[in-house]
Amino acid sequence: MNERITVAQIGHPILRKKTLEVKFNKISSSNLKNIIDKLILSMRSLNGAGLAANQIFYNLRICVIELENNKRYKHLPNIPLTILINPKIKVLNKKFTFDSYEGCLSVPNLRGIVKRYTNIQVDYYDENKKFHSKKILGFPAIVYQHEIDHLDGILFTDKVYNNKSLVSYQNYKVYHEKKYLERIQKKFSKDKY
Ligand code: ZN
């Protein structure tokens, strides 16, 4: 990509608007295809696990997710590239949750703990107008919820339930990351959730 990638930062109004649904007949248009390509390229070049269209200034209900051979989350299942158009989440079991230490490309230098469900269903269209209704379990469910929250104008900071968990990225790396990765691997690498 030649142009510089700019990601909307916390405080920008576009991050707080509920995004517009994509009309079914526009799903495979060349305009939409260009936006999706830009989302994928931006996510990959910024090393994100996902990116929502409003983070790159398109007010549309589209996000992309991909987690492959991530060095930080070894032993976790990969998430192949997934393009979600007009996604909707249904929580399948509210009893299954995980305290997720999150960060966001739109919230510089901050991490905080958010309670996420680990047993959800996601309904969406893909870029070929095909409808999917998928059960998403375990760690991937956390990534889906973070990205789909963006499409509803919600940032992870809205859901941090104990402000004392807020830390700078550098202090996360020094004081919290090791313990958190151990907790993730204990919880998710054995398919127990
Ligand atoms: Zn984010």
Image (cartoon, rainbow, N blue to C red):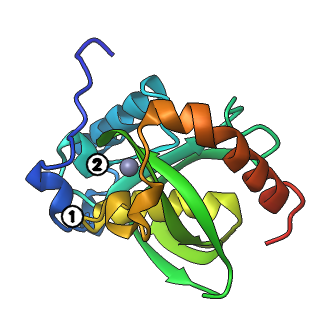
Residue 8 in the figure: left or right of residue 110 = left
* Disc on res. 19: 1
Return the x and y of residue 75 as percentages of the image width and height.
82, 42
Say whether disc 2 or disc 1 marks the residue closer to the N-terminus. 1
Say which of 132 and 1 sits in front.
Answer: 1
Q: How far from the left and from the top, in percent, is residue 48?
A: 48, 36
Q: Which residue is mark 2?
A: 53
Q: Pick whichever, 19 or 131, lies toward us.
A: 19
Give amino acid for label 1.
Answer: Thr
Q: Left or right: where does residue 109 sit relative to residue 75? A: left
Q: Are marks 2 and 1 in contact (CB under 8 Å)?
A: yes
- Residue at 85% in and 69% down: 192
Q: Quadrant of the N terminus?
A: top left
Instruction: Return the residue found at the far right.
Output: 190
Q: Amino acid at mark 2?
A: Ala
Instruction: Tell me the number on the disc at residue 40.
Output: none
